[in-house]
Image (cartoon, grey):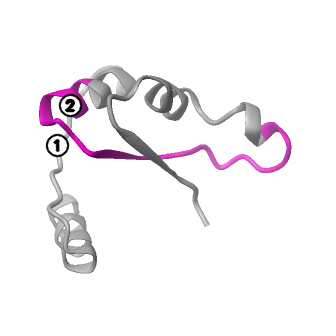
Amino acid sequence: FQQAMKRKLEDQTGLKVLTKIKTGVAQAILLEEAETLRADCIFVGSRNIRGVINRFLLGSVSNAVVTNAPCSVEVIRAR
């Protein structure tokens, strides 16, 4: 599944996609990898919460990455 998604993203976007599976605290790992790779941008999903509460509950991982990232962060919402 992981390799199929990687190929699909690369084919659709023309970007180089790097995939890794790691265990640990998600926000810490994302931030460490961004620094190590000198990433230009991090893409992270948001919680699927609707309404006014959504503004206050971005999600702990998304919020931590947005707040502490050494690069740009794009938060992706589910359709």
66 is within the stretch colored magenta = no
The location of residue 28, given as percent across then percent down, is 33, 20
Instruction: State the residue at coordinates (51%, 35%).
Output: 62
Q: Is residue 54 above or below residue 16?
A: above
Work out whether mark 2 precedes mark 1 in sequence or the reverse, and give the earlier one: 1
Which residue position is annotated with label 1? 20
Please give the residue where the numbered disc 2 appears in the rendered image.
33
- Part of the protein shown in magenta: 32-53
Identify whether 72 is placed above or below 18: above
Q: Residue at x 55, y 29 (%)?
A: 63
Q: Is residue 48 magenta?
A: yes
Secondary structure under the numbered disc 1 in the rendered image: loop
Residue 21 screen position, x and y as percent = 20, 39
Q: Residues within 10 Å of mark 2 (few under 14, many from 20)?
A: some
Within the image, what quadrant is residue 14 found in?
bottom left
Q: CA distance from mark 2 to mark 1?
A: 10 Å
Camera-nearest residue between 2 and 72: 72
Task: Tell me: 24 left or right of 78.
Answer: left
Q: Secondary structure at mark 2?
A: helix
Vertical comparison of 7 with 65: above or below: below
| Front in this rendered view, residue 23 or 77 | 77
Q: Quadrant of residue 65?
A: top left
Is label 2 in contact with label 1 (beta carbons under 8 Å)? yes
Where the N terminus falls, by quadrant? bottom left
Q: Amino acid at mark 1?
A: Lys
Residue type at mark 2 is: Glu
Q: Quadrant of residue 17?
A: bottom left
Which residue lies at the image location 26% right of the left edge and 70% below the top edge? 9
Quadrant of the drawing holding the C terminus: bottom right
Residue furthest bottom in the image? 12
